Image: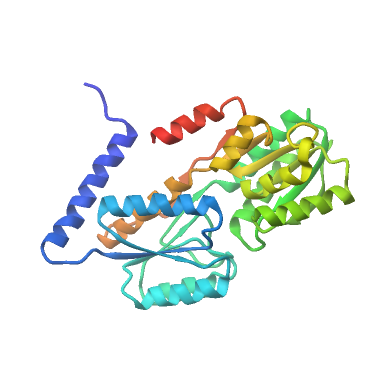
Amino acid sequence: MKQPTRRQLLNLGLAGIAGAALAGCASGGSLPKVTLALSTLSNPFFADLRDGAAATAREVGIDLAVVNAQDNAESQLDQMRTAAVSGSRAVIVNPVDSDAAKPAATAVMEQGIPLIAVDRGITDRTPDSFIASDNVAGGRQAATLLAGLLHSKGKIAVLEGQPGASATRDRGEGFLQELRKYPEMQVVTSQTANFDREEALDVMTNMMQAVPDIDAVYAHNDEMALGAAVALGSRAGTDVKIIGFDGGGDALEAVRVGTLSGTIAQSPAELGRQAVLQAVRVIHGEPPQASVPVPVTTVTKDNVDEFQNKAEES
């Protein structure tokens, strides 16, 4: 007898959860409310995360309220304080800043409301569940990919993500850890561009003036990688190898045509999906998973079509 696939098993689990939720509605109850507090929606990665969460919420019978902090930690604090007193049965947060998120997390936890962190952790606070890609491993993969492209020798510029974000720290840490294996590869300039494409264009332009002979760029996300590519012009992907991180649609197309040399691809929709599933667990009185790792994949021109096809099938 043919065994069900992992996706089929997940769908069966979803069907059971949805049935329980809908049965509650049929008996006169309203849909349980969950708040998803996102750092921003201007980055396509987080829009995909929201879409994955929203689709799963519809499947399982959850009223998902999405709030957007627009990369402002104070706004996120206000939004989470509101969520804590407005009937949310669980709160999912993608922190603007892992350090600054502590008061916001405290506001929720003091009300006894389950807290789930997605993509970025919270400094000095342990949420009920943490759903994230292995950013340290992804940073290592980026260094390994560049070592192969540069034959283990070259000057590297790094575009850092938002200061204070755990993803920034982890992606940078993993990259530098792995880079130690290649003594003839050196980071010669490193600066934040706050995960923003336009800011990365300006930062990269200034970097090129200060250090014109760089061989590669490692960006902590695809948006910055794409901004760097614009700044580098015809050098992007040829004289200067560029590695991004996320695996968004624009980046995959840039990898396909060779403007980016690769990206460390996450699955943002799956991050959103898993966050909602953990919220459902705690709403139904089941213990959540303390940590839900979502794998990352090194994507280059050689496997970009295969990666995209698999992502669409899932």
At which x and y percent is residue 279?
34, 58
The vertical placement of 128 against 3, above or below, is below
Quarter assignment of residue 286: bottom left
The residue that appears at 28% across and 59% down in the rendered structure is: 62
Depicted 273 relative to depicted 32: above or below: above
Quick check: can you spot residue 74?
yes
Q: Residue furthest left?
A: 27
Left or right, 244 with respect to 50, comes to: right
Please identify the quarter of the rendering in which residue 232 is found: top right
- Along the line of sight, the residue nearer the viewer: 18 or 70: 70
Residue 247 in view, yes or no: no
Is 148 or 157 nearer to us in this picture? 157
Locate residue 207, reporting x and y percent. Answer: 83, 51
The image shows a total of numbered marks equal to: 0
Taking 158 as reference, is 127 left or right? left
Please name the colour scheme applied to the rendered image: rainbow
Q: Position of residue 292 (x, y in %)?
A: 43, 49
- In the image, residue 282 above or below residue 85: above
Q: Residue at x 53, y 61 (%)?
A: 40
Quarter of the N terminus within the rendering: top left
> In the figure, residue 288 lies in which quadrant?
bottom left
